[in-house]
Amino acid sequence: MSARSIVAIVWAPKGYGQRSAAFSEWLGAKEYNIHYLKHRRPIYAPVKYIFQWLKTWQVLWKERPDFVFVTNSPPVAGLCAGLYCMVTRTRFALDTHPPTLFGRKWRWSQPIIRFVARRATINIIDQERFGRLIASWGAKVIILPDPPKTVPTALVQSENGADQVAFSYVGTFAGDEPIDILLDAARALPDVTFYLLGKKSQAKPGWIKSAPPNAIFTDYLVGDHYWKRLACSRAVIALTTHPHSLLAAAQDGLSIDKPLLLSDQPVLREYFTKGAVFVPHTTSGFVEGIKTLLAQEAQYQREIAELHTERAQTWDENFRQLQEIAGA
């Protein structure tokens, strides 16, 4: 092992922890995805956690890293890696996902999270409000949203403004996404084209069957196809009924300087302080939000570019702190 080796521990199958994988790459860490039995099946948790705990300690004792980055989801993963680090006096970063801090099903884990957070070398969280919570425990914290994505700049620049009046909605058709209202807004705005990006297999059949002609379900797009679709749009739409969800789709829009149409949720307002129109989950709210964005498009375009620069600078500054702590 090198003099300053870093190991990242993720209790999830490879491909499920994109945030962790990105941080591992940026830190130059050796990532271990440790998982047994079926993913996201609570009934298996008591059994698989035992096996994952033993495997984690086996990996850490074998690697003997100088620094450990652990994704604190589930919180048992943070406790497992954290106890190893406490025993061996190894420095470690605890990357805690917000749902474990407010979700009803995770209430039992709050004492565990506080115990490990206070002993971590540094805690990582993606939202200011939860950063303040962790700091109130007497723990050290850095605010770091998801790492910047690699965007095909030449492709995006060549496609910018290609469509007359088109918006791209990015989601997964999950239960927190008000798709019905978005489709109603599309019916009320026949001159605007709405592209709905996401797996068709996850969408309700009724949505696709009853969608107006100007609402197009594209299916799941990746790579250049995804970024080209966003670049061809006047704005990116991202929606959720969850008040504490910092939507990755909105961050993608920010990364290519696209104005945003977002749910009026506290965490989104806190992060996207300019370049975005916030709408209530009503048809009239969506329609008025889209009209406002189009009427003041130049202003929102300028603001989102400014916000992109500001957020990128803050992220770089905070990540450099993490690198210094980790010795990366």
Image: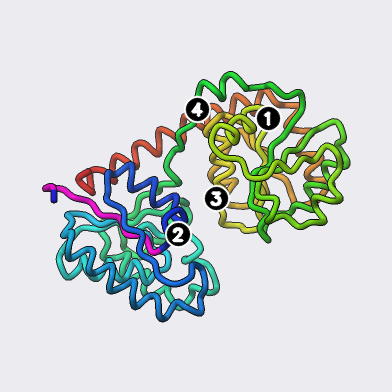
Badge 4 amino acid: Pro
Q: Position of residue 303 (x, y in %)?
A: 59, 28
Residue mark closest to the camera, 4 vs 3: 4
**Seen in the image, is 92 located left or right of residue 152?**
left
Q: Residues within 10 Å of mark 1 (few under 14, many from 20)?
A: many
- Residue 98 placement (x, y as % from top left): 48, 60
Q: Could you tell which of marks 2 and 4 lies nearer the N-terminus?
A: 2
The span picked out in magenta is 2-11
- Quarter of the image for residue 113 reads bottom left
Residue behind mark 3? 246
Query: What's the residue at 17%, 63% (across, down)?
Result: 62
Disc 4 marks which residue?
Answer: 152
- The answer to if 135 sits in the magenta stretch is no
Q: Rounded to the nearest whole Å, what is the CA distance between mark 2 and mark 3?
A: 11 Å
Residue 215, visible in the rendered structure = yes
Q: Which mark is residue 233?
A: 1
Nearer to the camera, 35 or 269: 35
Q: Earlier in the sequence, mark 4 or mark 3?
A: 4
* Element on which disc 2 rests: loop
**Circles 1, 2 touching at the beta carbon (< 8 Å):** no
Residue under numbered circle 2: 97
Mark 3 or 1, nearer chain start: 1
Q: Is residue 122 visible?
A: no
Q: Residue furthest left?
A: 3
Q: Counting other residues with Cα less than 10 Å from the Cα at mark 2, is it few (<14), some (14-19), or many (20 or more)?
A: some
Residue at x 13%, y 47% (from the top left corner): 2
Q: CA distance from mark 1 to mark 2?
A: 31 Å
Gap between marks 3 and 1 measured at Cα: 21 Å
The reply, left or right, for residue 323 in relation to residue 301 is left
